[in-house]
Image: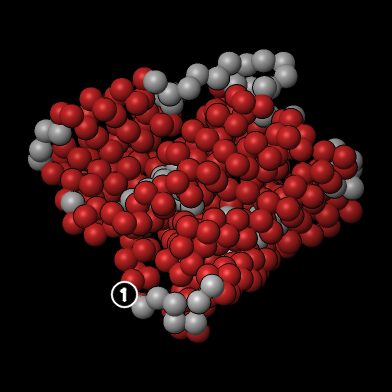
Amino acid sequence: MNNLPLNRLGEVAKLFFKLGVIGFGGPVAHIAMIEDEVVKRRQWLTQEHFLDLLGATNLIPGPNSTEMAIHVGYIYAGWLGLIVAGVCFILPAVLITGILAWIYVNYGTLPQFSPLLYGIKPAVLAIILNALWSLGKKAVKTRQLLIIAVAVGLITWFGNINEVIALLLGGILGMIWLRNSNQINLIITALTISTTLPVITITPVVPLWKLGLFFLKVGSVLFGGGYLLIAFLQGGLVNEYGWLTQQQLLDAVAIGQFTPGPVLSTATFIGYIIADIPGAIVATVGIFLPSFLFVAILNPLIPRLRASSWTRAFLDAVNVSAVALMVVTTLQLGITTLTLTKTLYVDFFGLVIFLISAVLAIRYRINAAWLVLGGGLIGWGVSVVGYFQ
């Protein structure tokens, strides 16, 4: 009896560390792997229970595949299982990303490495477009949700408002419009939260507590999947705070595609760039900690939350608003990636890499890791013919 919890913890650790190592292809691929292991092979959960958990992950911020791992660990091995499953699933990506961050900081500006990143960036843009296409088809369920998405996108593009406020506005509008009810208390609460968000100022050396607070905030409101992280980083670290350049953001997303596991491990890379190893640790803990807390709170409440009509309406609108933010960010990244800096003309080779990668990702569902590798090789080949001279 006493060995049963330890045996289960060992099983959880081995399974999710393995999935963390081989988990290329994004959250959909991760969830498919988890389902195959815990439902079909090990029979830790029934198919119905697994689907209930999967639906619940859409009710909270954070990366769905990571939260599914945490849910399964909690159900199979209790509170320690919750921690072990999440940490083991995240750890491989964090370690690999940290190593790549060190290589980037020490060698990323060398000519030998720049061509690789040149070819990788358009491929990453195509990967984001593929994720956006998939999420958009699921999120835009009705004409009202489409209108909300367009409104949030236009307000974000022209009004330059905070991403968190944009998500809250979209969610509140959807809740009122879709449910035809005036949820005054929730509106007041949401507006109060939006006015008390942490304000981070630009400083020559970024204090670790401010860096951690930024990623903690992002991890607490990251609806819509891991790729929405790019929108928050663009709006916060690049445009508002100036802690990261546009080039560094693109490089961070590109290098993040080399790693298995959740895309939020990009925070490790960015934290290292900003504040070395302590920054990497603080950023990683900050962005993933909310997922552990949300799953611990949500798991016992899943039946009631799934039965609530206003919660469904609010989250439908939040998800479609998140897609709108991703569209705006993808357009901004596309302009930067596919334009020659000196001439402002369209970058022909970059455009070709993007189009080929987009077709392979959307039409043939080629794994993101292969697209990144192919883009890097093409970039290297382009450098051989003197395109960067």
Residue beneath the point at 64% across and 22% down: 242
Above or below — where is 190 with respect to 105?
A: above
Observer-nearest of 359 and 219: 219
When the figure is inspected, residue 106 is found, relative to residue 199, above or below; the finding is below
| Residue 172 visible in the current orientation | yes
Please give the name of the residue rendered at 11% of the width and 33% of the height, measured from the top-left corner: 182
Q: Residue at x 13, y 44 (%)?
A: 179
Q: Where does residue 79 sit, x and y in percent of width and height?
A: 47, 58
179 or 7: which is nearer to us? 7
Q: Residue furthest bottom?
A: 41
Of 115 and 242, which appears nearest the observer? 242
Residue 117 visible: no
Q: Position of residue 284 (x, y in %)?
A: 63, 42
Q: Which residue is mark 1?
A: 48
Q: Where is residue 271 drawn, in percent x and y?
A: 68, 36
Image coords of residue 178 (percent x, y): 16, 44
- Number of numbered tags placed on the structure image: 1
**357 lies left or right of 102:** left
Q: Residue furthest front?
A: 2
Local secondary structure at mark 1: helix
Colouring chosen for the image of the structure = secondary structure
For residue 353, above or below residue 274: below
Residue 294, above or below 25: above
Amino acid type for the residue under numbered disc 1: Glu
Q: Quadrant of the C terminus?
A: top right
Judge the density around disc 1: few (<14), some (14-19), many (≥20) Cα neighbours within 10 Å: few
Rendered residue at 43%/24% (across/down): 197
